[in-house]
Image: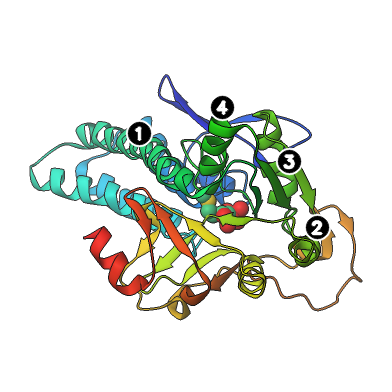
Amino acid sequence: MRAIKFKNKQLFYIDQTKLPLKEVWKECKGLDSGYKAIKELQVRGAPLIGVFAAYCVYIHFKNKSLAINKFLSEFRRTTKRLKSCRPTAVNLAWALEKVEQVVLSNNNKGKSGEQLKEIILKEAKTINQEDVKLCENMAKYGVRLIKKGDNILTHCNAGFLATSGDGTAISVIYKAYERYKDIRVYSDETRPLLQGSRLSAWELTKRGVPTTVICDSMAATLMEQGKIDKIIVGADRIAANGDAANKIGTYGLAILANYYKIPFYIVAPFSTFDLSLKSGKFIPIEERKKDEVRKLVNRIEVAPRGVKVYNPAFDVTPNKLITAIISDKGVINPPFKKSIKKILK
Ligand code: MRU
């Protein structure tokens, strides 16, 4: 099961806003439709938006026949616009910068617009395949930290709907389930857009993993009752010191985990690290539309019209609350500043 498909030079994706009620596949027709899909979270999750955006650049140029100068200026406009879709997940800019690099270096070699199109496609496919491998590696390293019988709490969605492979945090859960069977997952519903109840619970149950959905506000009670052995979540951007941005609510879980002495793991590939940022306070946090809070799944009004709303989509968990970061290159332990530098070198 995959969240996007590239077939016969066409790009398709599951519209994740329709899940879990309907599995609707749509086609990305170019820049505008790709931009909308990412902006509206039809396609979401840090690694997936990077892969999707890279393909989207190709789709945008697929049927265009442009002289090289026009091609290059249109190319710059396209990557700039896509990068601006979502500011927190660094994987988006990372993937588009990879595409920019191959285009630049091949332009220097005198390639034509037609040739550059195929080069973009090749790069998008490479990023896609690499992402699958990264998920496999995170699962391989992460599963070593899980024990038979563990009850795992996760937040938002970091599974196959968020990557090209089996996921970041949830790939570890799938691997543990495959190995032990005796694993249970608690999925925070993840207000305001409910990625936990709509998406994680959907994909986990589809794969047979015993899953219980809880409201975000119930996590403390479960921990107090001894029902949670581990917390495993993904990340959208990790600074050089290990501070990690993830879906809003993650930070609260980390504080609770610290209070109840429960291991708190972040799972993320190398493409989620941003070593140019010294700490999490420099991570840009996306603020989203008021209606996402004011209405349930953008439909039922649950707050008075005109009331003030604050809607940051992500928060930053300070490194001191993170037990370890599970990456595709191995498990990274504190002190993170040193160990991240060492493992990513
Ligand atoms: O706003 P979203 O749904 O794109 O947020 C996604 C998350 O916060 C995930 O936990 C994160 O991208 C890690 S995904 C593998």
Q: Disc 4 or disc 3, which is closer to the eye?
A: 3
Q: Which mark is residue 197?
A: none
Which residue is labeled 3 in the image? Answer: 211
Q: Disc 4 or disc 2, which is closer to the eye?
A: 2
Label 4 vs 2, first from the N-terminus: 4
Height in image: 195 above or below 178?
Answer: below
In this rendering, position of residue 27 left or right of residue 83: right
Circle 4 Cα neighbour tier, 10 Å, few/some/many (<14 / 14–19 / ≥20): few
Residue at 49% x, 66% y: name it. Answer: 323
Q: Disc 1 or disc 2, which is closer to the eye?
A: 2
Label 1 vs 2, first from the N-terminus: 1
Distance of label 4 from label 2 (alpha carbons): 27 Å
Residue at 54% x, 38% y: name it. Answer: 176
Q: Which colour scheme is used?
A: rainbow
- Specify the amino acid type for callout 4: Met
* Residue 13 appears in the figure: no
Q: Disc 3 or disc 1, which is closer to the eye?
A: 3
Which residue is labeled 4 in the image? Answer: 1
Circle 1 Cα neighbour tier, 10 Å, few/some/many (<14 / 14–19 / ≥20): some
Whole-percent x, y for residue 59 in the image: 41, 35
Which residue is labeled 2 in the image? Answer: 215
- Specify the amino acid type for callout 3: Thr
- Specify the amino acid type for callout 1: Gln
Label 4 vs 3, first from the N-terminus: 4
- Specify the amino acid type for callout 2: Cys
Q: Quadrant of ligand 1?
A: bottom right
